[in-house]
Amino acid sequence: MFDSGISAEELILRLDEEADIARPILKQSYIEWLNAAEQLLYSEIIHEQHKAEIDGNNIIDGALDLSVVTVPDGADSLRFEDIYTVFCGDRQLIRTNRASGDIFRDVYFKADGALGINCDMTRIYGIRLIYYIRPKLKTIGSDGAANGNIMLPPEFVPLISAKLRGEAYKIANEDALSAKWINDYNILLETFKAWLSGKQSEFGI
C-alpha cells in the first residue's frame, strides 16, 4: 500500500484550521469522509493485488470464513467483495451466485458473508486467493486523536485534502466553495488515474 507519511490527525487539524466555516466540523465527520475516500480509491481505482494461501482444512461445509485469512499489517480485514479471483490447485474457479454454486463444480460464490467454494480438490491443494487490499479504517483513539496515515503517495495528499474540504463546505451549506473543492478533487482524481496507469504492469491482468 502507499503511505504518504502524513498522519490523518495532522491533515484534519490543518484543514480544520484553514476552513473558513462558522460552525465547527466534528472530527468524526472528517474521519468518515477520509475513510470513504480511501476505501473507494483502493477498491475501485488502485486495485493493489495480494495473495493468500488457504489450507483446505479451513473450508468447512464448502465455505471459508474470511476472518481466518491473514492480511498484511495496516490492511483492513478481507471481505468477499475484495476477492479478485480464486484458484484451487492450478484451476481458476469461476465466480457465480449462491444458487448456481450448489450445482456447478469449480466455482466460488458469496455464502452469508463467507467464501463458498465448490471444488473437489480443496483438501489436496488448498485454495489460493488473489484479492484487492484496502487500508485499515481510521478511528479516533482514546486520546481523541485520529490514528493512521494518509495511505496515498505524498504527491496525491492534495487529492484527499480537496475531498475533505469539499465535504466540509457542503455540510456548512457553502455550496460554491464545496463545488470548487469537489471540482479540484475530480481533476486530481483523473491525474491520479493517469499516474497509476503509467505504472501498471505491461503483461498479465
Image (tube, helix red, strand yellow):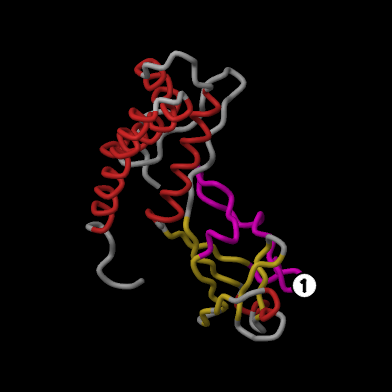
Magenta range is 55-83
> Residue 192 vs residue 171: left or right?
left
> Residue 197 vs residue 69: left or right?
left
Q: Name above or below for residue 15 compared with residue 182.
A: above
Q: Amino acid at mark 1?
A: Asp
Q: Position of residue 38 (x, y in %)?
A: 44, 43
Which residue is found at the position 67% from the left and 81% from the top?
A: 100
Which residue is found at the position 59% from the left and 61% from the top?
A: 80
Q: Position of residue 87 (x, y in %)?
A: 53, 75
> Count the marks: how many?
1
Foreground residue among 182 and 12: 182
Q: Label 1: how many residues lie within 10 Å, few (<14), some (14-19) or many (20+)?
A: few
Foreground residue among 44 and 170: 170
Q: Position of residue 10 (x, y in %)?
A: 40, 22
Which residue is found at the position 68% from the left and 77% from the top?
A: 123
Residue carrying label 1 = 61
Q: Name above or below for residue 199 compared with residue 15.
A: below
> Residue 122 vs residue 8: left or right?
right
